[in-house]
Amino acid sequence: MNNAIKEGKGPISEAWKLFKESNLGKTGLVILLFFALMAILSFIPPLIDPMYHPLKGVDPSISVSTPPSLRHWLGTDFMGRDILSQLLAGARVAFVVGISSALMSIILGTLLGMIAGYWGRIVDTLIMRAADIIMVLPTLLVILVLAALFKGLSIWSIVIIIAIFRWPGVSRVIRAQTLSLKNRPFVDAARAVGAGHMRILFRHIMPNVVPLAFLYMTFRVTSAIVIEAALAFLGFGDPTTVSWGMMLQWVWKTGHMFKAPYWLLPPGICISLITLSFYLIGRAMEQVLDPRLRRDWEG
Amino acid sequence: MKRFWILMCFFVPWAVSTIPCYPAETIKIGLLQEPKTFNIWMATDTWSSKILGLLYPNMFLRDPETLKLVPWLAEDMPKLDVSEKSFTIRLKKLKWSDGTPLTSEDLVFTGNTILKYKIPHFYNRWDLVERVEALDERTVKFYLKELTPLYESRTLLSPIVQKKEWENVVKSIETSPEPLKQLLNFKVKSPVGIGPFVVSEVKEGSYIFLRPNPHFELDVKKHGNAPHGKERVRIPHHYNIIFKVFGTTDTAILELKKGGIDYLWWNLPEGYIADLEKVNGIKIFTSEKNALYFLGFNCKREPMSDPFFRKAVATLIDKEFLVRRLLQGKGVEMDSVISPGNKEWYCEEGKSYGKGLSREERRKAATTLLKEGGFSWKVYPSEQGNWKAKNLLMPSGEEVSALSILVPPADYDPVRAMAGTMIQEWLQEVGIPVTARPMPFNALVEQVKSRRDYDMVIMGYSNLSLDPDYLRRFFASEHTSYKGDNITGYASQRFDQLADASSKCMDVEQRKKIVCELQSILREDLPVIPLYNPYIVEAVRIDRFKGWIPGLGGVGNLWTFLNLTPAKGK
Amino acid sequence: MRIWRFLLRRLFQVGISFFIILSLLFFLLRLSPGDPYSKYIDSDMTTQEVEIIKSQMGLDRPLWAQYLIYLKNFIKGDMGISFYYGKPVGEVIRGKVFNTILLFTTSVIFSALVGIFLGKIAAWKRGSLLDSFLTFSSLVTHTLFLPWLGLLLIWLLGYKLELFPLSSMYTPEIWLDPEISFLRKLLDVLHHMFLPFLTLFLLHFGSYLLLMRNSMIGVLKEDYILTAKAKGLEDKDIINKHAVPNASLPVITSVGLSLAFSINGGALTETVFSWPGLGRELVVAVSQNDYPLAQAAFLLIAIVVLLANLLVDLLYAYLDPRIRYE
């Protein structure tokens, strides 16, 4: 890990060079960009014609699920809504959910990890014990139980809850990193100059743990997307958002599982592909940050 | 050698006679959820009720065609004594499934237990009874608190439990600090019932096996020609029932197609009807329900409190479109809160809004109504073509804030969800700022019923009683309180008076007149806009069993079960 | 001696963790909006009758009193009565636990074994086409969306090819027939189990494969392997007798660590296949707002996970002396 910790600029372009060498990473990035494009394009269909609105738009002449046609490139769902626009909207939801949830959990995890590592002792023990308990629990089931209590969750509640249950993984690593940084010369120097704890933490330690945090973010995004999709699939998602998981729930529950492959396949493929892409990127980034892995991965 | 054969002559018949004579034929019925219990007090969910209905038929049943009450456990219609405020019932000579006779003691015990512990869902059928008294072995007198015709649709449509089975339980809960909870949670493995079937074997989450009740009797002579005239009610042809539990409708319908089940006891999703119609040996039955799906207004909030607003909304809603497109024609429009199928009580009188009008005409009519009510717009609706009305203003001049129509999620009920979307579009055309908001069902019920925190909502009652007393429950002002059924907050003195009179009027013809006026009032005041009453569409394998009798609520009724015979052979 | 102290300390931690989870659940449940007893209340009832029902369900006492009763009951083993079933929660769960264990353990064990086996091959044949294929398919199958995979398998193998039943665990006709042998009945269950098992297997073997591969590559560089080679031992022996046992260790421990992930998957699989297990029961309980049942199912899973992690830690401690002195 030491290679990645350099003071000053440089690491990012160096990292990018290494990343580009990885085939896996490139593939992942390409797929991701494709989905990003989808997400951006999702704003267009409703502008073309209100019937293309993913949630509210119905084709006035169609009220059952129909296969792909010129008007509806992926066909319609059971209410006569356009599947392609739902798919595009789902991409948007995936990014929003994935990234915000990951960001929140990374921020939370980094802060708590730094605090735990820096202060040590009681604070450290408390935070790490909490992390232990939370990390061990199956997130999906926890959210299910919470969904039972609160009679349904909005998309933002889901995002926040996922974030709350995902910080432990990050914090552990950040804590370890902080521990090793705590007693480095540059920190001592800062202390000698009279820098307060806050300053040391945020000006000196944080910049060096951020690349690591960033690495973990990719995995967090994946799990956030999958958990939201699983929740929506089980019927506990936010009914006002159209996500891929929600689409799968609709095709399943309205009895079109066997009859509408054009409706069943796209959302599942999308979820799997976006998961794959983040996974590949994550692996490639691991290589960048840990030279030991570089040789072992065919890249 | 000879001795051996003599012994065999005795042994074999004995051995054979001890083999239980189980019927060879078994009908396989699909369920979509596991029934949660066999404890009749607890079994108020749809699936448990379906099964327990076969074990505990009510004292009186409804004829599937005429919908009139038919004495089932009772010998005849009850004898009413107006002066005493009582009615008397004489029970038939029947036996419970354990062989013991049905007596008045059982009925008195049932009534007393319900009254004493106020058992939910049963209590509202017995709360008009003051007390019950056994006059002799099979005669029971019911004393009413006040003279009301409601006992017919409530108390008579009530089951009886066996005193022998339950008396120990009831005795043990007398001293408990939580008697009702204990009663409801009492585990019943195989209930002693008086219906045509008994529970034989259960594999949790998978299947339930019923065998014919050996002690079930049916007076074929008396009921041989009921119902329908053409079909005859026979003694159950000695068939077993396997109830298979499926996780999803998909898999259940697939099984139906393949012949793994003979009947799916649920409404078919639209997408499958065409498929199933093509299969040889499957018949599709369309039956009526006594249901009501409506748009409810929170009459305590503006602008819903304004009758002109409500009438304008009613004008904009094209019910025929909803039935044709959302229900694919499988249902009827509702103008009154009582369904046209409820011939005894339905009354045609009363206002309709926008019937037969085109979209253009509806918009014009609605705009006129709103103007009459003193509403105005910042951007007026133009009369030709471009209906881009915006910013509706109240008579006071304030702008109408964004309104929402609460609907259940699309996967819970696609029809209601879609209706919400359509209605939203129609209202927006005239500048009413409304959006349909899907909400998880439990949360929706909570918000509307308990907290009364909503603007408009699309709700439904899928199984209304035929007796119109529910009008009183839903619209009389006394029920606007906590947990009452008057979710709209509607209050009208005239309505209250009439509703009260209706619940006390013993003369049927006079009561009909009162109920007719109640319906007119509701059609004028519009606390809710009735939308539609869907049919129930079911599929059965008539190549396996025949004798299906459609009734209110579908083919899965007691008459069918008594009439079914295997299709092959005589 | 040290190991006992370690064990005790960790057990104590598990106990505390569990207690915290238990209490958190209780307070979250009681403080959440809505009333669970609404299923029991007729809208015709007066407020007084509503109060009677509330007291029946024990929901009218002050919060702290309810909490103490809750703890007391829990220690006694009484997890409450399911609102939905009306039966003691323990009874409902008891019926389903075995089904979950059956499905879950077979799929985990099988995917771990296959993962180890294929990972070993991939590592040995590093850089070859086979290796790339195995690695690639592991990545792809590992990232598939589980419910979707399940639905796809049902569609393909159950519906189109009609090779397997579409759902549930038994065929009633077979189980009700007294003449059918037990073996046949067992086969019926296995027949039903195949698709959910396959779904879980496909999802999990990939990660084990990749882990094993990495681990093997690392081990193969170790000195003692070179020594073995120098001694002239056959390749096959080197791999199987020396490399694999050491390389499998991280895989086996990761089974415990990824338990949470596998359990999520279990719940989803059971729902999609209507497999009557604990995970599905939890989902049903949640949709019915039956929180005694949901809570109990969740707690059961939590304690299993906590103990499994403890076991994993123990294993680590046993194998790696450095950690013991933490």
Image (cartoon, helix red, strand yellow):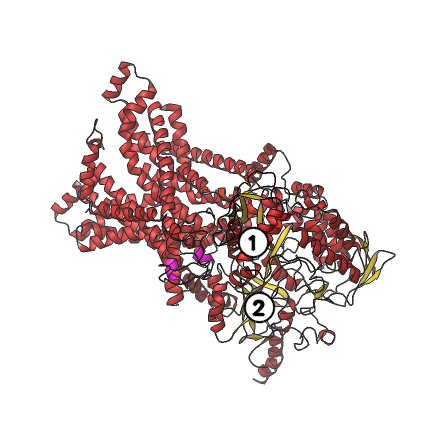
Q: Is residue A99 magenta?
A: no
Mark identifier at residue B202: none
Q: Nearer the viewer, residue A35 or B182?
A: A35
Label 2: chain?
A: B
In the displayed structure image, the side of residue A94 where residue B331 appears, left or right = right
Q: Few, some or many C-alpha atoms within 10 Å of disc 2 (few <14, some 14-19, many ≥20)? A: some
Q: Few, some or many C-alpha atoms within 10 Å of disc 1 (few <14, some 14-19, many ≥20)? A: some
Q: Quadrant of the N terminus of chain C?
A: top left
Q: Which span is picked out in magenta?
A: A250-264
Q: Which residue is mark 1?
A: B364
- Residue type highlighted by circle 2: Thr
Q: Is residue B57 above or below residue C25?
A: below
Q: Is residue C253 above or below residue B72?
A: above
Q: Earlier in the sequence, mark 2 or mark 1?
A: 2
Q: Nearer the viewer, residue A63 or B541?
A: A63
Q: Is residue A292 above or below residue B535?
A: above
Q: Secondary structure at mark 1?
A: helix
- Residue type highlighted by circle 1: Lys
Residues beneath discs 2 and 1 located on the same chain: yes
In the displayed structure image, the side of residue B233 where residue A244 appears, left or right = left
Task: State whether residue A138 appears in this view.
Answer: no
Q: Quadrant of the C terminus of chain C?
A: top left
Label 1: chain?
A: B
Q: Is residue A256 magenta?
A: yes
CB within 8 Å, label 2 to label 1: no
Q: Which residue is mark 2?
A: B286
Quarter location, residue B14: bottom right
Task: State whether residue C185 appears in this view.
Answer: yes
Percent x, y of residue B287: 60, 67
- Between the C-alphas of marks 2 and 1, the distance is 37 Å
Q: Nearer the viewer, residue B85 or C316?
A: B85
